[in-house]
Image (cartoon, rainbow, N blue to C red):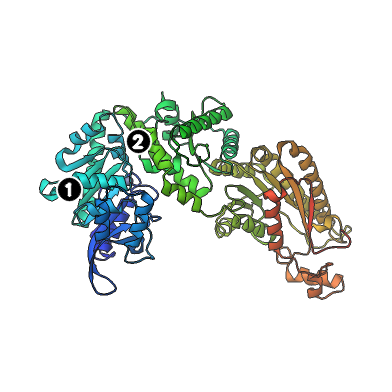
Amino acid sequence: MESLWNDQEAATFGTDPLGQRVYTSRLLGRNPALVLHGGGNTSVKTVEKDFFGDEVALCHVKGSGWDLATIERAGFAPVRMSALLKMAELESMTDADMVTQQRAAMTNPDAPAASIEAILHAVLPFRFVDHSHANAIAALTCNADGEARVKECFGDRVIVVPYVMPGFILARTIYEIIKGRDLKAEGIEGMVLLKHGLFTFDDDARRSYELHIEMVTMAETYLASKAGGWSAPTGAAVEDLAGLAALRQAVSRLRGVPVIAKLDASPEAVGYSLAAGVAEFGTRGPLTPDHSIRTKRAPGYLAGDDLEGSLAAYAEAYRAYFERHQKGETMLDPSPRFVIWPGKGVVSFGANVKEAGIVADIAAHTLRTVSLGEAVGGWEPLPEKDIFEIEYWELEQAKLRKGPARKVHEGKVALVTGCAAGIGFAIAESLAEQGAQVIGLDIDKEIPEIMQKIGGIGMVVNLTEDEPVQAAIDAVVRGFGGIDIVVSNAGIFPKNEFLGEMTQNDWDRTILINLTSHQKLMNKTVPFVKKGVDASIIFVGSRNFKAPGPGAAAYSCSKAALTQLCRVASLELAPSKVRVNIVHPDAVFDTKLWTPEALERSAVRYGMTVEEYKTKNLMKVEIKSKDIGNMVAAMASPLFSKVTGAQIPVDGGNDRVI
Ligand code: ZN
């Protein structure tokens, strides 16, 4: 492992201790083999003037909710040293009281809550303290001989601390170990917390950081010598997208909410999934206790092709684990956060794309570390009772209870066609606002950028072509695990052509885009939608179907046939609990279909002004794209969970339709 320190870059963070602290914290955060997603913590001790001009000794500790990779000055909580040292003297203290007292001791009450390791940072008599959960330290210490290996690797440079629960008890344990000692005189440069992580410290920011890099490198070198030329197994994946969608559906059911599934089919993940004995050693436990909050104690293992049976066994084992250790806590859902899928790879799950990504990162580092740990003498992570204490920690349970309310479509994957503008865009936007991961398919070359604006993904596809559409759908399933919502919207509105004047090409093209491309989309998406969660297909029709006008035969006929396609689909898919409905908008003029000229032409034909024409419905209201977007999002939601085969007009009331 290399030091990433750079003098020029360091200078841009300021030469004061807090500036240097921000810089070296980011350097730690840049290396995922050291810390991942909010893991690890750092601090710096300073003496400053408070608001009243009095000198006060502070420990600036990483605030909770901040990530070392992106931390700023504002991400550190300034806590009075006097209070932290006083807390270290207490015989006992609940973690909830500790958090409250740490907050009460901050000179800026608006700063984030200090890390639960604040007291531990305070008692270490060095200006800078760096703490990580490095992979190499886990591989070194998650072993029956952990302590002896640490001594062999680092000699007397570090203090070895047996595992105790992080928080007050850990701070207290370390306070007792170092009380009355002169660590500087003894040449102590760090602490290895068995089955947890590494601390290094120094009065110089760079030195403390570089000690960290040096010690992790020593651990890596030590492990490599023990491994004797061993390298992680690799394998080639057998792709099974239908199986992936079925797996995601089953995990969603177990968890009680739709989840995003992220497949890791890298050679390393596949090799791990096929390693002899992985069902056993791969499910012993996490590489650092912190991870269990994201990943639970252990991943699932899918035996054979029995997805349901394997998941049921996982849930049963989880319930038993909870019962063995619970002291009145509320059980979390019993679904795995990631699973080992032999021959296919590793699949991670999250309530949304971000969470699935975090779990996937942790999983990738876990399998690498577990594999190595097992190869160099046996992977032996923390016992389950210690993991339970972290997973069901009062502070963590409180955090979960306080979490933001779920959005209605969170965890769902929605495919929307023809969404570069107008009604299609409004639908994509409404679904995204309500939490869905939206994938937009459109022939417009700008679709990737357009979808990016709403946090979605855009793919340039001609919906009348088979192979590109299939490739796009496969990519969606590969990326997110399945498809729950399909909004079949793509369409054109050809310029007014009367039957006697219409070219054959106009007719054919309209039918191809407005009808046949939808049939093709059904053909390719239905197998996946059947494995969706609260699955729903929505077609975008038109008032024209029930109330046609002259000069638009191809358009009217295509929408009438599309409505019939919807009715047949609803009959076919009802047994699979997939709802199929159609929305019939009318007179939506904020779309690409309606140029000012087309609007003028239509108004004239009805003998109206453009304004009159825009509100020519019974309620005299203007219908906007967003009205359709919100209606479609509602139709895809549980509100419509028992509605299929319905035709919903969004037209302000039309006497020819009513
Ligand atoms: Zn830690």
Q: Earlier in the sequence, mark 1 or mark 2?
A: 1
Q: Is residue 55 visible?
A: yes
Instruction: Indicate the amino acid at tag 2.
Output: Thr
Instruction: Find residue 91 and report its horizontal and vertical position in percent.
Output: 27, 47
Instruction: Find residue 408 and report its horizontal and vertical position in percent.
Output: 62, 52
Q: Is residue 5 visible?
A: no
Q: Seen from this angle, which residue lies furthest left?
A: 185
| Residue 153 to residue 174: above or below | above
Q: Is mark 1 within 8 Å of ligand 1?
A: no
Q: Which residue is mark 1?
A: 179
Identify which residue is drawn at 23% across, 72% down: 54
- Whether residue 495 sits left or right of residue 65 in the image: it is right
Identify which residue is drawn at 51% across, 29% down: 302
Under circle 2, the secondary element is: helix
Instruction: Indicate the amino acid at tag 1.
Output: Lys
Badge 2 crowding class, 10 Å Cα cut-off, few under 14, some 14 to 19, many 20 or more, is: many
Q: Which residue is mark 2?
A: 369
- Whether residue 241 sits left or right of residue 222 in the image: it is right
Identify which residue is drawn at 30% across, 61% down: 79
Residue 64 vs residue 497, the one in the foreground: 64
In the rendered image, which quarter is residue 64 located in? bottom left
